[in-house]
Amino acid sequence: MSAKEHTYTVDLKWTGNLGEGTKKYAGYSRNHEIQAAGKPLILGSSDPSFRGDPTRYNPEDLFVSTLSSCHMLWFLHLCTVNKITVVAYEDSPKGIMAEEEKGSGHFKKVTLFPNVVIKEQEKVDLANELHHQAHAYCFIANSVNFEVACEASTSVEGHVD
């Protein structure tokens, strides 16, 4: 049996021509737009360290959020399968990127910090274990060549420690 394939298409448009194109390094904006059919527009730029607009998402922000959302979606699925009722899920992932002397770079590590609230006290340990399975299934985490760590915490709705 062959593997299923899925195709994803987005439209990217550079909107940063300030009149002279890329004639000068400082003479153009890094602003761009990302959109997929039927979905809201994402306003992008480069990181402010690379002359980008700090009010727009940069590729690094989007990359880190993609790892986080893929993990969350698998985790929620696995909780459903294991009859764990998740009532809240928040994450503030942190990515570390190394910039090389000549300007290239790469991510060294991304750490996810999911904070999960469930209903079932007796399933806290199982919920914590499911993060490992979610990581193993995550399409995005399986596509990167650096460590994706997970430091999860689980609490029970209405339960005070």
Image (cartoon, helix red, strand yellow):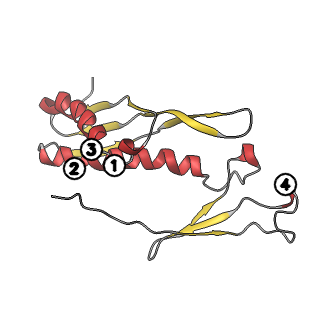
Q: Position of residue 81 (x, y in %)?
A: 13, 47
**Left or right for 73, reference 121:** right
Disc with the residue nearer the chain's start (4 vs 2)? 4
Q: Gap between marks 3 and 1, in whole Å?
A: 6 Å
Disc with the residue nearer the chain's start (3 vs 2)? 2
Q: What element carries label 2?
A: helix
Q: Can residue 58 be seen in this view?
A: yes
Q: Gap between marks 4 and 1, in whole Å?
A: 36 Å
Q: Which amino acid does label 4 sit on?
A: Tyr
Give the residue number, with chain letter if any, for mark 4. Answer: 25
Asked if 35 appears above or below 50 in the picture, the reply is below
Q: Name the residue nearer the viewer: 69 or 86.
A: 69
Tag 3 near tag 2, CB within 8 Å: no
Q: Gap between marks 3 and 4, in whole Å?
A: 42 Å
Residue drawn at 38 percent across, 42 percent down: 141
Q: In which quarter of the image is residue 86?
A: top left
Asked if 135 appears above or below 76 in the picture, the reply is above
**Left or right for 72, reference 18:** left
Give the residue number, with chain letter if any, for mark 2. Answer: 77
Using the image, tell me which numbered label, if any, was put on residue 139.
1
From the image, state whether disc 3 or disc 2 is nearer to you.
3
